[in-house]
Image (cartoon, rainbow, N blue to C red):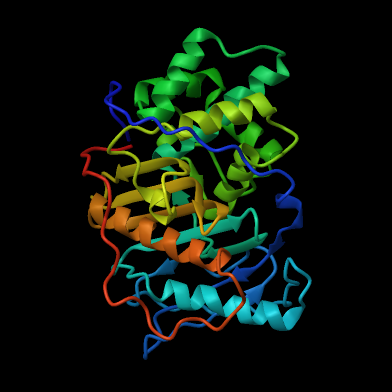
């Protein structure tokens, strides 16, 4: 889940977040159900993030679609416009090749467009993306106590986020009170489906992409809990990820404007990989928050490819200039995997 000591890193400073965007977001839910005899996809517009399950390979049983009321678009254009835009996630996700036995869930918010899209609501192990949550919980505890982080805490935080150092994460996990402290902070942050790992096993914290999007809104939005200084500190560290660990949701950015934390973990019982990525990217002139979670991957590289393709697909939906009809065919070739291979976990 990381390296025992810091390595070389490429420093990229996270861009300041845009204010006043989040309150006007109207949640648009698109649930994709693959696995029909013809391999067709179905989508259902729904308010919020409730859905039948993760997007998985066509070999998996197809979940039943969930019906629900049509939501109102963020610009007030009405149900017809929402119906048009709700078709976009289905078309976008059809371009993502989900390997047999793997599953993926992705949630995205366009801070400028106010559009939210999500695929799947399954629960996933966090691996090292929980390190963002650990630092957010530590900063909240420090604020409650009316103090700044100590020099040692800041050293741990830097190594934990920028280099995914596991020893530093374990030290801060103990500082926040382990799973109990994380869960208490998350209740205040608004996470409802995240549970800290048992004992010292912070990497086995379980979460959903919707909850991770809620956490990102605390870090990059204007939430009342984390102070401006605390948010800026977290954003800065997530914008200075070490070389070789900067894959993931950054693949959806149209330049170097991103801030992220990735996680990767081979499960000892199955040998299959958990690969996750969360963060903020800029694409099409819009700042987007993205959480892409996956498990059941045969290799780390396959997981990286899956979360990158899913992030691109989700971001393309919320940055679409109009609620137009979806493209008729997916790209002729899947995107390539970026980032170098790293053994072990992160």
Q: Position of residue 42 (x, y in %)?
A: 51, 83
Q: Position of residue 309 (x, y in %)?
A: 37, 62
Does residue 284 sit above or below 152 in this rendering?
A: below
Q: Position of residue 317 (x, y in %)?
A: 53, 68
**63 relative to 330 in the view: left or right:** right
Where residue 318 sits, quadrant-wise, is bottom right
Regarding residue 33, the answer to whether it shows in the image is no
**107 relative to 204 in the view: left or right:** right
Regarding residue 172, the answer to whether it shows in the image is yes
Between 318 and 217, the one lying in front of the other is: 318
Residue in view at x 65 percent, y 81 percent:
83
Does residue 155 sit above or below 233 in this rendering?
A: above
Residue placed furthest toward the bottom:
38
**140 relative to 4 in the view: left or right:** right
Between 340 and 29, the one lying in front of the other is: 340
Quadrant placement of the N terminus: top left
Q: How many marks?
A: 0
Between 315 and 34, the one lying in front of the other is: 315
Quadrant placement of the C terminus: top left
Residue in view at x 59 percent, y 29 percent:
232
Q: Position of residue 65 (x, y in %)?
A: 57, 79
Residue in view at x 32 percent, y 39 percent:
245
Residue in view at x 54 percent, y 76 percent:
88
């Amino acid at each position: 889940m990381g390296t025992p000591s810091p390595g070389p890193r490429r420093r990229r400073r996270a861009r300041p977040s845009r204010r006043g965007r989040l309150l006007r977001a109207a949640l648009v839910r698109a649930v994709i159900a693959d696995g029909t005899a013809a391999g067709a996809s179905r989508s259902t517009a729904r308010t919020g993030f409730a859905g039948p399950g993760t997007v998985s390979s066509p070999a998996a049983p197809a979940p039943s679609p969930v019906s629900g009321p049509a939501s109102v678009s963020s610009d007030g254009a009405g149900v017809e416009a929402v119906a048009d835009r709700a078709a976009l996630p289905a078309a976008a996700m059809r371009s993502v090749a989900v390997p047999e036995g793997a599953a993926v869930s992705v949630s995205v918010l366009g801070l400028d467009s106010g559009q939210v899209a999500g695929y799947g609501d399954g629960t996933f192990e966090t691996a090292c993306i929980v390190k963002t949550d650990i630092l957010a919980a530590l900063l909240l505890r420090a604020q409650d106590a009316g103090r700044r982080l100590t020099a040692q805490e800041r050293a741990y935080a830097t190594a934990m986020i920028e280099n995914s150092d596991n020893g530093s994460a374990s030290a801060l996990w103990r500082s926040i009170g382990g799973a109990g402290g994380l869960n208490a902070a998350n209740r205040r942050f608004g996470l409802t489906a995240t549970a800290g790992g048992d004992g010292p096993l912070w990497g086995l914290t379980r979460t959903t992409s919707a909850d991770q999007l809620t956490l990102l809104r605390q870090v990059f939005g204007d939430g009342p809990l984390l102070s401006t200084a605390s948010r800026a500190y977290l954003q800065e560290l997530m914008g200075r990820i070490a070389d070789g660990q900067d894959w993931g949701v950054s693949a959806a950015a149209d330049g170097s404007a991103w801030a992220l934390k990735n996680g990767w973990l081979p499960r000892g019982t199955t040998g299959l990989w958990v690969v996750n990525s969360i963060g903020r990217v800029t694409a099409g002139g819009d700042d987007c928050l993205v959480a892409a979670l996956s498990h059941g991957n045969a290799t780390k590289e396959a997981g990286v490819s899956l979360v990158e393709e899913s992030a691109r697909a989700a971001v393309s939906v919320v940055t679409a200039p109009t609620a137009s009809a979806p493209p008729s065919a997916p790209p002729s070739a899947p995107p390539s995997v970026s980032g170098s291979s790293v053994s072990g976990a992160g």
